[in-house]
Amino acid sequence: MVQVTDEHVKQLLRAALRLPDPRAPAAVSLLLSQSLTTAQLSRVSWRDFDLQNRMLRIRFSRTRIEDIPLSNWMVTQFRRIPVGCEVRIFAPTQPTQPHLKDLLARILLTAKLNHLCVESFVAWSKTQTPRVRSLTAS
């Protein structure tokens, strides 16, 4: 397996920002800063998002739920995502938008990192200090 480097992380973030889909930067930021898997990201709903207090409730498992603070940058990224009729934040809000798994694959392809997988970036995040992870979300 190819090891994710800091340069790969920068490439992934830049690619997410280049895509027209407003969900891309928020998804990548949560993936990198909170080590969230695709499954965990797909469960994040608008009712978990507290814009006023800049917090997001993450359900890591049935018994482990955490409220995580969001940076100003992350709040801005979430505000760009249309609420639409879907409860899930990363669900497509338009027929032309891909589902989350396909969106993440598109980000990897745009970053020319399709030799890596999303799980590799989750693993990278888990090895970083909280400070380094928080910097990826600001």
Image (cartoon, rainbow, N blue to C red):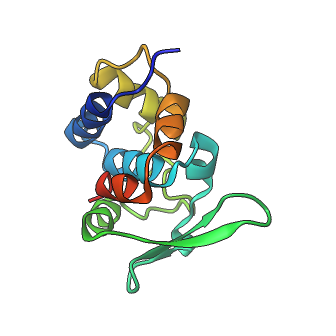
Measuring from the top left, give residue 135's x and y in whole percent.
Answer: 29, 56
Q: Residue furthest right?
A: 62
Q: Nearer the viewer, residue 74 or 6?
A: 6
Q: Nearer the viewer, residue 43 or 13?
A: 13
Measuring from the top left, give residue 40's x and y in whole percent.
Answer: 62, 50
Residue 18 lies in quadrant = top left
Q: Horizontally, is 82 left or right of 50 in the view? A: left
- Residue drawn at (44%, 46%) of the image: 128
Q: Nearer the viewer, residue 3 or 48?
A: 3
Quadrant location of the C terminus in the rendered image: bottom left
- Let me know if residue 17 appears in the view: yes
Q: Residue furthest bottom?
A: 52
- Let me know if residue 99 appears in the view: no
Q: Horizontally, is 7 left or right of 3 in the view? A: left
- Residue drawn at (35%, 44%) of the image: 24
Counting labels gives 0
- Residue drawn at (32%, 35%) of the image: 9
Q: Horizontally, is 124 left or right of 36 in the view? A: left
- Asked if residue 118 is positioned above or below residue 22 in the image, the reply reads above
Q: Nearer the viewer, residue 50 or 70?
A: 70
- Asked if residue 85 is positioned above or below residue 129 in the image, the reply reads below
Measuring from the top left, give residue 106's x and y in whole percent.
Answer: 38, 27
Measuring from the top left, give residue 75's x and y in whole percent.
Answer: 32, 69
Residue 17 lies in quadrant = top left
Residue 63 lies in quadrant = bottom right
- Residue drawn at (26%, 30%) of the image: 7
